[in-house]
Image (spheres, rainbow, N blue to C red):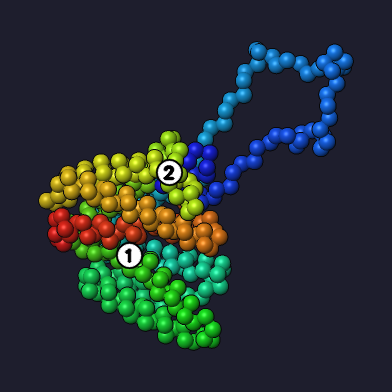
């Protein structure tokens, strides 16, 4: 997402707002300022700068993360996703289920470490994977039933522990079930359509293009902060970049990838994706600030954890699914 120049950059790093210290004043002199002697009696005046020496070069802006590692990991994930998406649909459903389980593990681990909130992982992981599969096999009705059963399992599982903080723990568990697997289920709903792989590919492309546009424009032109109390690195210029890039990509995808799609539908789809992806990123930034952490995990070099990559995708999935159904039907 967008960043401000000289502020640590995008993705997991955008929440690190530590500024670099400026070296000046008495750091290189005596602590007590001394009045210099008159110019006429100075014994060793400092030599004038040599005009023939090249001036110090200004430091280049840094992206705030290991870009080579981030690009390598991103390309690797893209190959796995595309291969599974267009070879066997069931394999891609498995990829989504694995991502959901890992995301739940990261979220519940951080809640336990930072807030001592014990959201039960076992029923969440089993119910989350079942939710994704049910959404693909039985549609929205199956997803809702799996969500209800997962919430019930969380309540029952937590009963094996002492009653202290029971309400707090089960509330966090139900929130985790909705935030990660239920929202991810809409990817499975998209995939179930006849042209499902192309719908999912459009969803992924628009989200990535939105994030990339926000990052590129914000890094180069960002001056006005979007939400400084939540994520100081995001700028209004970056948001404009996200909207522009996503709308152009949406028009192209709807015109050439989606059956019966039209370019003007892609413009609306891109606008909605830019908005939902930005809100999703800000939402996870709020969670991380409340927990006092920079990243949800360290599984993906240059990116952070799985949840740091799902932050924009999760809230965008139901938006794209709904608009696809309205524009071209459920397939």
Position in image of residue 281 (x %, y %): 41, 54
Image disc number at residue 260: none
Counting from the top left corner in percent of width and height, residue 84 is at 30, 57
Q: Secondary structure at mark 1?
A: helix
Closest to the observer: 262 or 34? 34
Q: Are marks 2 and 1 in contact (CB under 8 Å)?
A: no
Q: Residue at x 42, y 85 (%)?
A: 156
Q: Secondary structure at mark 2?
A: strand
Residue underneath mark 2? 235
Can residue 59 be seen here?
yes
Using the rendered image of the protein, determine whether residue 302 is visible from the camera's viewpoint: no
Residue at 83% from the left image edge and 27% from the top image edge: 35
Circle number at residue 183: 1
Neighbor class of circle 2 (other Cα within 10 Å; few <14, some 14-19, many 20+) is many
Of the two numbered discs 2 and 1 in the rendering, the one whose residue sits closer to the viewer: 2
Q: Mark 2 and mark 1: span between their CA atoms?
A: 26 Å
N-terminal label among 2 and 1 = 1
């Amino acid at each position: 997402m967008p960043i401000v120049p000289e502020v640590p950059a995008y993705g997991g790093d955008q929440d690190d707002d530590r500024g670099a210290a400026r070296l000046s004043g008495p750091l290189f002199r005596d602590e007590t300022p001394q009045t210099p002697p008159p110019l006429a009696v100075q014994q060793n005046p400092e030599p004038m700068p040599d005009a023939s020496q090249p001036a110090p070069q200004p430091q280049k802006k840094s992206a705030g993360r290991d870009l080579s590692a981030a690009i390598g990991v991103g390309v690797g994930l893209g190959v796995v996703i595309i291969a599974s998406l267009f070879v066997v649909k069931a394999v891609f459903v498995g990829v989504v289920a694995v991502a959901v389980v890992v995301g739940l593990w990261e979220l519940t681990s951080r809640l336990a470490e930072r807030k001592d909130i014990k959201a039960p992982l076992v029923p969440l992981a089993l119910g989350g994977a079942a939710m994704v599969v049910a959404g693909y096999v039985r549609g929205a009705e199956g997803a809702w039933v799996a969500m209800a059963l997962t919430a019930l399992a969380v309540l029952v599982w937590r009963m094996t522990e002492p009653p202290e903080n029971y309400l707090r723990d089960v509330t966090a568990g139900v929130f985790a079930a909705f935030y990660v697997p239920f929202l991810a289920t809409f990817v499975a709903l998209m995939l179930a359509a006849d042209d499902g792989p192309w719908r999912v590919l459009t969803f992924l492309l628009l989200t990535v293009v939105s994030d990339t546009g926000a990052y590129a424009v914000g890094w180069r032109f960002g001056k006005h902060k979007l939400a400084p109390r939540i994520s100081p690195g995001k700028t209004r210029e970056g948001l404009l970049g996200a909207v522009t890039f996503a709308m152009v990509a949406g028009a192209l995808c709807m015109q050439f990838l989606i059956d019966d799609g039209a370019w003007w539908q892609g413009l609306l789809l891109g606008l909605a994706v830019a908005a939902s992806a930005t809100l999703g990123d800000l939402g996870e930034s709020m969670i991380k600030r409340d927990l006092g952490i920079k990243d949800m995990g360290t599984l993906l070099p240059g990116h952070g954890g799985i949840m740091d990559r799902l932050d924009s995708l999760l809230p965008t999935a139901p938006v794209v699914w709904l608009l696809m159904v309205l524009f071209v039907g459920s397939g």
